[in-house]
Amino acid sequence: MKHKPVWLPGVLTLGLLLLGLWQDSRALWSSWITVVMIWGMLPLGALAVLFTHNLTGGRWGEVSRPVWLALAGSLPLFAISLLPLLLVMDVLFAWLQPVASLPETVQNKLLYLNKPFFIIRTFCYLVLWLGMSWLLGSWSHRRTSRSPGLAAAGLILWFITLTFFGVDWFISLEPRFYSDVFGLMLCMSAASAALAAGIMLYSATERRPAASGPRRDIANLWLTLLLGWVFMAFSQYIIIWSGNLPDEIGWYLQRNAGIWRAVSVWSFALFFLVPFAVLLSTKAKNNRAWLCSAAGVCLSGHALQMLWLIAPSLAPATATQGVLTLLLTVSLGATYVGFIRHLWRRQSLPPAVSELSVPGEQYV
């Protein structure tokens, strides 16, 4: 079977970007930052899954490692799609307005929130994450034995960098807002979304029915991360609501008005409630169709969640922005899928997950 060129979706995405620049550049960049984060969280979350398996071991990670390597291998796409946003920071970040026009609370943060330092931090994040992806891939290709110490250090560094990335690219869109919990919530969200995507890839690459044990273990890890995410999200909400400080409560009030209230409800239902209900059933965790369906629903909720976190901080929503966001989500998603498939064919990955089952091994 002849494969379609991997670059076709990328060309379509570039065409949409040019069309958006011509129609409404502000709406384009407001849409683009949302779409970049929707898809970029998947390879970032895959890094955490790989580090976790190298730290703890377990057969679930051995048979599914090609999935996480392929997802993490798409990090260069995230870097390429993120970099153009550094050229239009003035459109996105309110703290780049003249200092005299900024509230005192924002002026006090300008030692951290300044353009040169922001760009340096962003490049540091990307270099570190790309280095992590390369290191994890080299461990696998060389069949290097697990190094729990290095994996633990890598996981800690991943938490720290993604937390600061969340402060820079999410929280600073509304620089008056502050949350101690947001970074951890974003880490849980990224890992949960990556596990949902990984479950779909895992199932799609099974060439024959495989033992359900690894799939069930992955589902249990996914459930744990979803519970961690909802705990962090609820903690942030309770802390901010009980404090009732204008700079912090306004962030939630803005997201509880108009269309964003519906987006909030649907994102919570799709990202957490539906997968949670499915994952409570042992039978469902052993069923590929049920897990794939729950994973697809979760990824839809993930997209709405990124939209809910980012879009209200930017220009008022318009029809043009909505259409651009939808089209760019599909086209950039197709680019990611094509790139991951390309990696799967070209890289020297371990055999397909179904071929790694040990003859006679049974899971209870």
Image (cartoon, grey):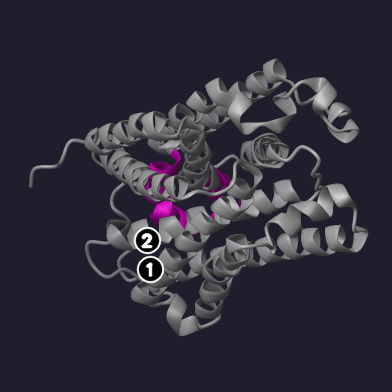
Q: Which of 216 and 178 is in front in this view?
A: 178
Residue receiving disc 1 = 292
Magenta part of the chain: 47-72
Query: Mark 2 is on which residue type?
Result: Met
Query: Mark 1 is on which residue type?
Result: Cys
Callout 2: helix, strand or loop? helix
Mark 2: few, some, or many residues within 10 Å (few <14, many ≥20)? Answer: many
Whether residues under marks 2 and 1 lie with C-beta atoms below 8 angstroms apart, the answer is: yes
Q: Position of residue 15 (x, y in %)?
A: 29, 32
Q: Viewed as shown, does residue 174 lie left or right of 294?
A: right
Quick check: is 293 in the magenta stretch? no
Residue drawn 68% across and 38% down?
173
Residue drawn 51% across and 62% down?
301
Residue receiving disc 2 = 200
Q: Is residue 59 above or below residue 18?
A: below
Q: Where is residue 334 in the image (x, y as percent from the top left)?
A: 31, 45
Q: Where is residue 128 in the image (x, y as percent from the top left)?
A: 59, 27
Residue 202 location, quadrant: bottom left
Q: Confirm whether residue 144 shows in the render.
A: no
Q: Confirm whether residue 99 shows in the render.
A: yes
Q: Is residue 87 above or below residue 93?
A: above
Q: Position of residue 214 (x, y in %)?
A: 44, 65
Residue drawn 49% across and 64% down?
298
Quick check: is 52 in the magenta stretch? yes
Q: Nearer the viewer, residue 143 or 179?
A: 179
Q: Viewed as shown, does residue 47 lie left or right of 183?
A: left
Q: Is residue 124 above or below residue 180?
A: above
Callout 1: helix, strand or loop? helix
